[in-house]
Image: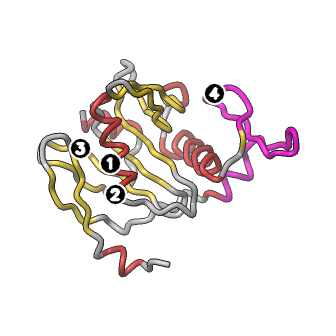
């Protein structure tokens, strides 16, 4: 298992569609108390499988490891960071060329312009270059100013700039997202 000191030396090339650059991945971990938020979710057993009620999709969905992270993190964004629930789309469909894709979550402005793409992974899935490449592909369509990536253990937030990407030391509150536009 990779330790923090090894991870802090990890360099990655993030593609912004304009040029490749090397960026050092921050080892900042955002602790949003996954287990505390999971205890507050509406979880039940249905057909011998655990399901959770997704407030955004307004239905019960299978409680996969990735879904645990998604639900806990989104509730944390709404309750602690001031993100309006009504301006977050879950499993947001987009077309990338001829392919139909879905962003795990997209945060919109009051005028319904996309501000942030959020990608979730299960807690045992490492946040690698491939995850950032996936968001970069989505961003060619949405052109957002902020990315957030989380597996429940680690979370990275970054702003898209003219020069590339700037890793943030904290997850921005909702009102801060609009300042990046």
Q: CA–CA distance between discs 4 and 1?
A: 26 Å
Q: Residue at x 13, y 41 (%)?
A: 18
Quarter holding residue 143: top left
Would you name the residue on which mark 3 appears? Answer: 160
First reached walking from the N terminus: tag 3 or tag 2: 2
- Magenta-colored span: 35-61
Near-viewer residue (172 or 141) = 141
Report the residue that reaches farthest toward the front.
Answer: 98
First reached walking from the N terminus: tag 4 or tag 1: 4
Would you name the residue on which mark 1 appears? Answer: 133
Q: Position of residue 179 (x, y in %)?
A: 26, 36
Near-viewer residue (120 or 79) = 120
Circles 1 and 2: CB distance less than 8 Å?
Answer: yes
Circles 4 and 1: CB distance less than 8 Å?
Answer: no
First reached walking from the N terminus: tag 4 or tag 2: 4
Q: CA–CA distance between discs 4 and 2?
A: 29 Å
First reached walking from the N terminus: tag 1 or tag 3: 1
Up the image or down, 175 lies above or below 149; here it is above
Would you name the residue on which mark 2 appears? Answer: 129
The residue tagged with tag 1: helix, strand or loop? helix
The residue tagged with tag 2: helix, strand or loop? helix
Would you name the residue on which mark 4 appears? Answer: 57
Q: CA–CA distance between discs 1 and 3?
A: 13 Å
Q: Residue at x 68, y 26 (%)?
A: 58
**Image depth: mark 4 or mark 1 in front:** 1
Q: Position of residue 42 (x, y in %)?
A: 77, 41
């Amino acid at each position: 298992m990779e330790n923090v000191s090894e991870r802090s030396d990890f360099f990655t090339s993030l593609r912004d569609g304009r040029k490749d650059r090397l960026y050092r991945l921050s080892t900042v971990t955002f602790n949003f108390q996954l287990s505390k938020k999971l205890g507050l979710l509406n979880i039940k057993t249905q057909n011998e499988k655990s399901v959770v009620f997704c407030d955004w999709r307004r239905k019960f969905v299978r409680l996969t490891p990735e879904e645990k992270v998604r639900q806990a993190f989104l509730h944390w964004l709404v309750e602690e960071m001031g993100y309006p629930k009504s301006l977050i789309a879950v499993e947001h469909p987009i077309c990338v060329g001829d392919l139909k894709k879905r962003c795990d979550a997209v945060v919109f402005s009051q005028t319904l312009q996309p501000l942030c793409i959020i990608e979730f992974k299960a807690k045992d899935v490492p946040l690698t270059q491939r995850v950032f490449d996936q968001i970069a592909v989505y961003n060619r369509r949405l052109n957002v100013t902020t990315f957030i990536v989380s597996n429940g253990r680690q979370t990275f937030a970054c702003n898209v700039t003219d020069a590339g990407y700037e890793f943030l030391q904290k997850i921005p509150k909702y009102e801060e997202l609009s300042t990046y536009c």
